[in-house]
Amino acid sequence: MDSVEITASQIRNLDLGGLQPWARLNPAVLVQQAGSLTLNVDWPRADDDPRELSEIPELRLWSLRADAELPWLPLVLERSSGQLTRHVAMLVPHHFSRTEGIRFAPEALELWITHRLFGLDAWARSHGLQCRQGLGQMAAVLGFELDAEFWAPLPPS
């Protein structure tokens, strides 16, 4: 698993430099690296700051830029430790409960994940790659069950 440090300075300056080594990777390598990237965000907070990272405007803005410029980012983010979920929380309306964790607005999550699935599938196919299984796993981590017929109307991978 690879780890990238994201500093407060990078966040304040909307600097994606820490992700540039990943941006230079061949698409086939990105597909092979699905679920392996951890972002370590170094954002100073007071001990009494109750906000979750996804509630900090500067972090959300940085994440929006990263998501726009690196649309494959959700595919490569580590899944089991919450990296993918945290990233999506930066982009999709949600609420946080100390007892239930993150609860996404269902319609917003459905729109985001469907858009991302279509986009990443088209990106992979444009490079002669197949990543539908990884995309299905990515969706499942977010609680989105893909019907077996989801891919049927689309060109084969």
Image (spheres, grey):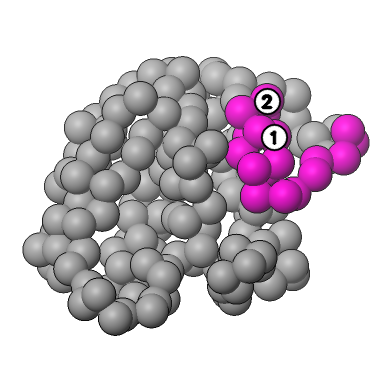
Label 1 and label 2: CA atoms lie apart by 5 Å
Kind of residue sitting beneath label 2: Gln
Residue 152, picture quadrant: top right
Q: Which residue is tagged 1?
A: 136
Does 6 sit above or below residue 73? below
Q: Nearer the viewer, residue 147 or 98?
A: 98
Asked if residue 143 is among those painted magenta in the image, a careful observer would answer: yes
Q: Is residue 61 left or right of residue 11?
A: right
Residue 87 x, y percent position in the rendering: 45, 55
Which residue does the image show at 23% across and 39% down from the upper left? 4
Q: Around disc 1, counting alpha carbons within 10 Å, would you say few (fewer than 14), some (14 to 19), or many (20 or more)?
A: some
Kind of residue sitting beneath label 1: Gly
Which residue does the image show at 33% across and 55% down from the upper left? 66
Give yes or no for contact between labels 1 and 2 (Cβ–Cβ under 8 Å): yes
Is residue 30 among what the camera can see?
no
Asked if residue 64 is among those painted magenta in the image, a careful observer would answer: no
Residue 113 has which mark?
none
Dot 2 falls on a residue whose secondary structure is: helix
Q: Nearer the viewer, residue 62 or 68?
A: 62
Does 115 sit above or below residue 152? below
Residue 46 x, y percent position in the rendering: 21, 77
Residue 124 x, y percent position in the rendering: 54, 29
Q: Which residue is tagged 2?
A: 133
Is residue 63 among what the camera can see?
yes
Which residue does the image show at 66% across and 65% down from the upper left? 100
Q: Is residue 10 left or right of residue 60?
A: left
Q: Which residues are magenta?
A: 132-149
